[in-house]
Image (cartoon, rainbow, N blue to C red):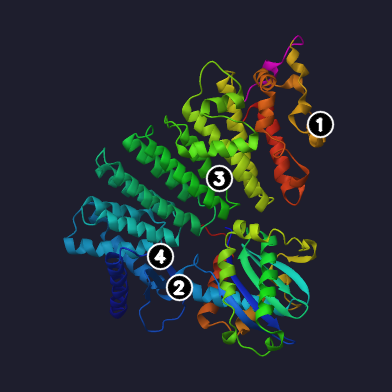
Amino acid sequence: MVKLYCMSVFYKGPSSATCLKAAYDLQSFNFFQRGSIQEFMAFVSKTITERTTTASRQSVKQGEYMCHIYVRGDNLTAVLISDEDYPPRVSHTLITKVLDEFSQIIPASSWSTISESDVHFPQINTYLAKYQNPQEADAMTKIQTDLDETKIILHNTIEAVLERGEKLDDLVAKSEGLSIQSKAFYKTARKTNSCCNFS
Amino acid sequence: MEEDNAMYEKILIDIKNLIYCDPNLKDFCIVPINENKNKSPVLYEEHNLGLELWCVKYVYSYLYKELFKVRQRLTKNRLIHQKIEEVDKYLISALLIHPDVSTFWNMRRELVEYGIINLDIELLLTKLVLSNKSKSNEAFAYRKWVVTKLLKAIPKQDIGSTLALLNREFIVTEMAAQKSPNNYHSWNHRMWSLEAALTKHDFADTISYLNLLFEQLDFSIRWIQSHISEHTGFHYRQYLLKCVLNSDCLGSERTIKSRHLLEAFIHIKACDDETFIHQLLGKCNSPMHCSKVNFIILLLEDLFYFMEKLNELFPGHEAIWYHRRFIIFHILKIAHEYHNIGWFRNVNINDLMLNSNDNITNIDYDLLCDGNNIQNYQNMNWTPSSLPICTKYFLSSNLNIFKKIVPPNVMPHKNNWRGGTKNGCSVFCVLIKIIILFNVE
């Protein structure tokens, strides 16, 4: 499937990252699981932001999902979670575009202190919706070819992004952002994906 | 124990009532909630139905026992009415939880046959089952059975009702295909529905059938754009394209539009289909059948327009190249038939060796590709003497046309070698080679 699920803007502080704005499109998931999936996407986005060095781009593939991230030199970060078929070049173009626009609207001095609810940046939702069809979106941004694709670091699993000795299961168990229900959801999903299932 | 059973009964009644009361239910799923919070595990919000995981184990083993108690008596139709309604209730939950048990589906068939349950409920139930387990073969088989029954009840001249029924199948199969990638069960069901409607009304030669196909073709290109690596979508498109051949109906505005689009790509100016075909394939005594004209226009539109666009946006997806192979194969096949040249599959090359007097051996094969790519083609070991005679004849008389059909931009061009396309592209070259040399699909 060619789809964007989640886009979020973070400020990467010295010890942890804070979410400044996020937009989701989870229509394709089951109604009762959307809440947990949203929590998970936020959790993954935050985890990856904290483990990406300043001024770098990464793309992480996990199962059928791709997670693209760009931490700018000034520590403003955008994370985009998409399906594996979504063209990565368009994803990174979108990230750059959203970050540019964000930093124009929200002054850099407030990034480290402002909370998510105070950030007024509805454009992020518009972008997420518009870029669902990469064809239309790409036509508009075709001129922007300054993206150097060779500089994007590619990882094949989330585990590859984690620091030495860290395990995803432990991070999930420790996380405060995930509800009990979402943790149960994670365990069930792990179990069903651990062997071949024909459902 | 007694108390537990009462609780299970309550859960089962809740689910049954929801299904009977809300015809707009969208979705069913088992929600991973592992602890009993002492409230009903049946969730219902915005037309979505959910069942909490912790209770599934107990409920299922309860209803399993209950169902097999009455199984024998149900088959012999020796149940009292009240009991039969209970069976209905058990079956609904049993199938939602575990749709791969054929016995349960068969018990439902019996209920339908006894006139206990109505077919609309069955359509809703299979839809819900498929929303949870979108690859359930049993559910699709059962749905086919239900749809066949409904089709039978429609009078032969009432195409409108059939189309409405067909539309409902389209919605369900799209939902199921959306839920799991490469869901061939779902696409097969979709094709089966199309065919069932066609056999029922035998309306292949009417414009409404052709329009139906065009609508589906438009749908399929939208689908492919958002599911680029799923061959199922392409396969469905190929099926639809071949369906156009069934229809003995003159092209509509749609094909005229496509033709105009094509004229820009292959520099042919034609005012009608006939001159278009003449310019493309050369003149021939017998005119081409209009179904084939439609077919060839649609194929060329795919080749020059849609596949180019897709390839640019999603470089390196093999499914696109496989679709190209399909297109080229069928264009060549039709061109052969048009010139009344034999089109053999799996021909034995040795039987078709040319003798030395034949001047066709002098064909300049480099003409097939533009100057930049000669290198690639030389690597392919073209051996004119091993070409089947029919294809040679075809090539010699239609070299220019062949160049148009396989235009330079489809040939392995430098730009197409970037990234993963290299694979798809070389596969494609090899395939063209195989098609030409061996006439195999």
Judged from the image, the secondary structure of the residue bearing numbered disc 2 is helix
Mark 4 belongs to which amino acid?
Answer: Asp
The span from disc 2 to disc 3 (Cα, nearest Å) is: 32 Å
Residue at image location 43% in from the left, 47% down from the top: B190
Q: Is residue B42 above or below residue A112?
A: above
Give the percent coordinates (x, y) of residue B414: 78, 44
Q: Main secondary structure of the magenta part?
A: loop
Magenta segment: B345-357
Judged from the image, the secondary structure of the residue bearing numbered disc 1 is helix
Which quarter of the rendered picture does the N terminus of chain B lie within? bottom left
Residue at image location 70% in from the left, 18% down from the top: B350
Q: Nearer the viewer, residue B76 or A127?
A: A127
For mark 2, does the 10 Å Cα neighbourhood hold few (<14), some (14 to 19), or many (20 or more) residues? many
Chain on which label 2 sits: A
Chain on which label 4 sits: B
Residue at image location 41% in from the left, 81% down from the top: B36
Q: Are marks 2 and 3 in contact (CB under 8 Å)?
A: no
Which sits earlier in the primary sequence, circle 4 or circle 1?
A: 4
Q: Which residue is mark 2?
A: A32
Give the percent coordinates (x, y) of residue B73: 23, 56
Q: Which residue is mark 1?
A: B378
Q: Which residue is mark 3?
A: B234
The span from disc 4 to disc 1 (Cα, nearest Å) is: 57 Å
Where residue B248 sits, quadrant-wise, is top left
For mark 1, does the 10 Å Cα neighbourhood hold few (<14), some (14 to 19), or many (20 or more) residues? few
Judged from the image, the secondary structure of the residue bearing numbered disc 4 is strand
Give the percent coordinates (x, y) of residue B162: 32, 45
Mark 3 belongs to which amino acid?
Answer: Phe
Which sits earlier in the primary sequence, circle 1 or circle 3?
A: 3
Do pointers 1 and 3 mark residues of a single chain? Answer: yes
